[in-house]
Image (cartoon, rainbow, N blue to C red):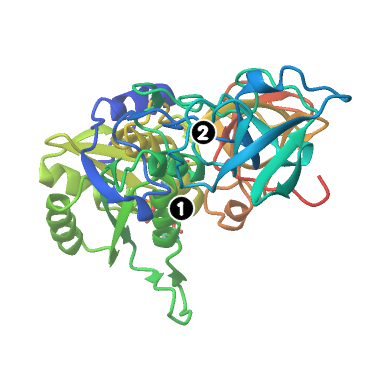
Amino acid sequence: MLDKRNPIKIAEAISRVMKYEKKGETEYSSIYTSNGRYLADDIKATHDVPHFDRAPYDGFAVRSVDTAQASQSNEIVFEVIDHIGAGHVTNKVPAAFEAVRIMTGAQMPEGCDAVLMLELSKSFEKDGKTYMSTKRKLKTGENVSFKGEDAKTGEVLIHKGTLINPGIQAVLATFGYAQVPVAKKPAIALFATGSELLEVEDDLEPGKIRNSNALMITAQIERAGGNASYLGKLPDDFDTCFTAVENALHESDFLITTGGVSVGDFDYLPAIYEKLGAEVLFNKVAMRPGSVTTVAQLDGKLLFGLSGNPSACYVGFELFVRPIIRTFLFSKKAHLRREKAILTADFPKANPFTRFVRAILSVEDGKLVAAPSGMDKSNIVMSLAGANALMILPGGSRGYMSGDEVDVLMLEEFTGSEWPW
Ligand SMILES: Nc1nc2c(c(=O)[nH]1)N[C@H]1C(S)=C(S)[C@@H](COP(=O)(O)OP(=O)(O)OC[C@H]3O[C@@H](n4cnc5c(N)ncnc54)[C@H](O)[C@@H]3O)O[C@H]1N2
Ligand code: MOO
Ligand SMILES: [Mg+2]
């Protein structure tokens, strides 16, 4: 007797999965390897930046009051009493009409409140002493980079859950975070099921295909910020699959399988969930591709049964697994970013299920436009290669036409540009 599967709405399926979301733990990463990780704590300024007043230009530190009478017709002369570069501090305190030759980044001498740019001065030597003259009048504070102008002690600069990027690396380094609090990556066990599967290195054989899902999902896990542990392919044999899944569950935060979730004679995942005593959250979603996506939980641990069909597998991952990974990494925006785009192709055929069409999203005349990246069937691999978005075409009685506005989910936000801009 076939079990009748009732498709549930996508939003309902996502919320059933998210009930089992878990926040990860904090671990410390050397700053040298923290780029691309997710922050496990808010980052606060632990001191003022800069922590001393400094010169933003190469020139002369002066007391602005001494330049009050400077003009095109009245050159003021200063004796240069010291000469410092960045990293050096003078212990001399300039008196009236005394200056310190200073380089960009050096700490301002005590008593000085302005910096004269080198280009606005003339230097000369007289009687073994160094002098400079200028016609430029300076205001108090002119050309000084003040203590705390970049960041003030205690300011929250970056929030927990943020992806560490090059700019954040600079902030972390500024405050001496040699060890950075980062979210521990979830450990995700992955099996590809199917007796038809060959590994990448294998030559083709009649009736067999190379296992593309394992590599695809591994890369999707990494893109989402998780740690994939691919445990190999499994033949369509109940006992082998059951033992492998049961063992892997203990060593992972979540488990993903691909294939074997539909109603075929060798689709063993439903029976495996049953024997494990896992609660099946759903086994049919009103979406295409990925309608057979099945998610179960055992003692709060999620088991994602993604479809074997490559595009269905891909979409199932992005909708259901990605937000669980991102939540583990403390993200407050765990789901794919949604935007509006103009469709540039016709989809006249009505579909009862919402479709997630692999798409190329681009910008034309300042507007987002979306076109399919290739053939739109769930067993298709090639259209995945060019896809940087999924167009959402809600199910219902109507089709969609070029020019319609649709929602799109962005898969990658690092699209480059050709030269010239
Ligand atoms: N009678 C029905 N048949 C099917 C239904 C249905 O509702 N009733 N659903 C169809 C839909 S929709 C999908 S999607 C697939 C899902 O199948 P399974 O998740 O059970 O996956 P398999 O049967 O194991 O494989 C399906 C397909 O994908 C290929 N495959 C599997 N693993 C990989 C891999 N690692 N790399 C590349 N390709 C893989 C496999 O060879 C099959 O061609 O079921 C429909 N059938
Ligand atoms: O589940 Mo199938 O993935 O609808 O195409
Ligand atoms: Mg099947």
Question: Hey, which quadrant is residue 97 in on the image?
Answer: top right
Residue at 42 percent across and 47 percent down: it is: 36
- Which residue is nearer to you in this view: 68 or 164? 68
Q: Left or right of 342: which side holds 128?
A: left
Q: Pinpoint residue 56: horizontal percent, then vertical percent.
A: 61, 36
In the rendering, which numbered label is found on residue 394?
none
Q: Pinpoint residue 81: horizontal percent, then vertical percent.
A: 57, 41
Q: Pinpoint residue 306: horizontal percent, then vertical percent.
A: 36, 46
Residue at 71 percent across and 40 percent down: it is: 132
- Look at the numbered disc 1 and give the secondary structure of its residue: loop
- Which residue is nearer to you in this view: 303 or 38? 38
Q: Is mark 1 within 8 Å of ligand 1?
A: yes
Question: Hey, which quadrant is residue 349 in on the image?
Answer: top right
Q: Left or right of 173: which side holds 382?
A: right
The residue tagged 1 is: 309
Instruction: Give the label, 2 or 1, closer to the camera.
Output: 2
